[in-house]
Amino acid sequence: MTLAEVQKGQKFIISDISDDNIRVQALRFGISEDAGLFCEEKIPGGPVIIKRQYQEIAIGRNLAKNIKVELSQ
């Protein structure tokens, strides 16, 4: 499953960021593989807004399609 497929309100863990450039961008925001996150909002045709602790980040759909995740509880 990719980040683009996550639904609003779901908790998930990033399992793989295969592209090195995307991994570097994610690390700049404090997001890495095995990071636990929450889908705060999913704007139709727009970005996926994720939350980690008190930080919210909007990730574009094309970028989100390249980030593999696993749902968590």
Image (cartoon, helix red, strand yellow):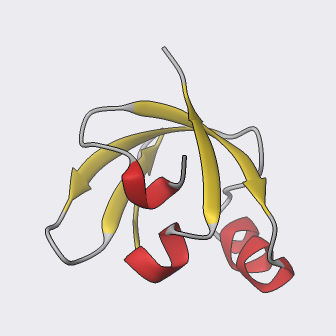
Residue 2 in the image, given as x and y percentages of width and height = 53, 54
Q: Front-most of 11 and 52? A: 11
Q: Measuring 39% from the left and 75% from the top, which residue is drawn there?
A: 61
The answer to whether residue 24 is above or below residue 13 is below
As drawn, the residue found furthest toward the front would be: 1
The answer to whether residue 29 is above or below residue 21 is above
Q: Quadrant of residue 9?
A: top left
Query: Along the horizontal axis of the image, is 14 left or right of 32?
Result: left
As drawn, the residue found furthest toward the top would be: 73
Q: Measuring 75% from the left and 67% from the top, which residue is drawn there?
A: 27
The answer to whether residue 22 is above or below residue 66 is below
Q: Measuring 44% from the left and 30% from the top, which residue is drawn there?
A: 11
As drawn, the residue found furthest toward the bottom would be: 21
Query: Along the horizontal axis of the image, is 66 left or right of 6?
Result: right
Q: Quadrant of residue 38?
A: top left
Residue 48 in the image, given as x and y percentages of width and height = 33, 63
Residue 35 in the image, given as x and y percentages of width and height = 68, 40
Q: Is residue 60 visible?
A: no
Q: Front-most of 23 and 51? A: 23
As drawn, the residue found furthest toward the right would be: 20
Q: Front-most of 9 and 7? A: 7
Q: Is residue 67 visible?
A: yes
The answer to whether residue 26 is above or below residue 56 is below
Residue 60 in the image, given as x and y percentages of width and height = 40, 78
Q: Measuring 35% from the left and 32% from the top, which residue is drawn there?
A: 10
Query: Along the horizontal axis of the image, is 64 left or right of 54?
Result: right
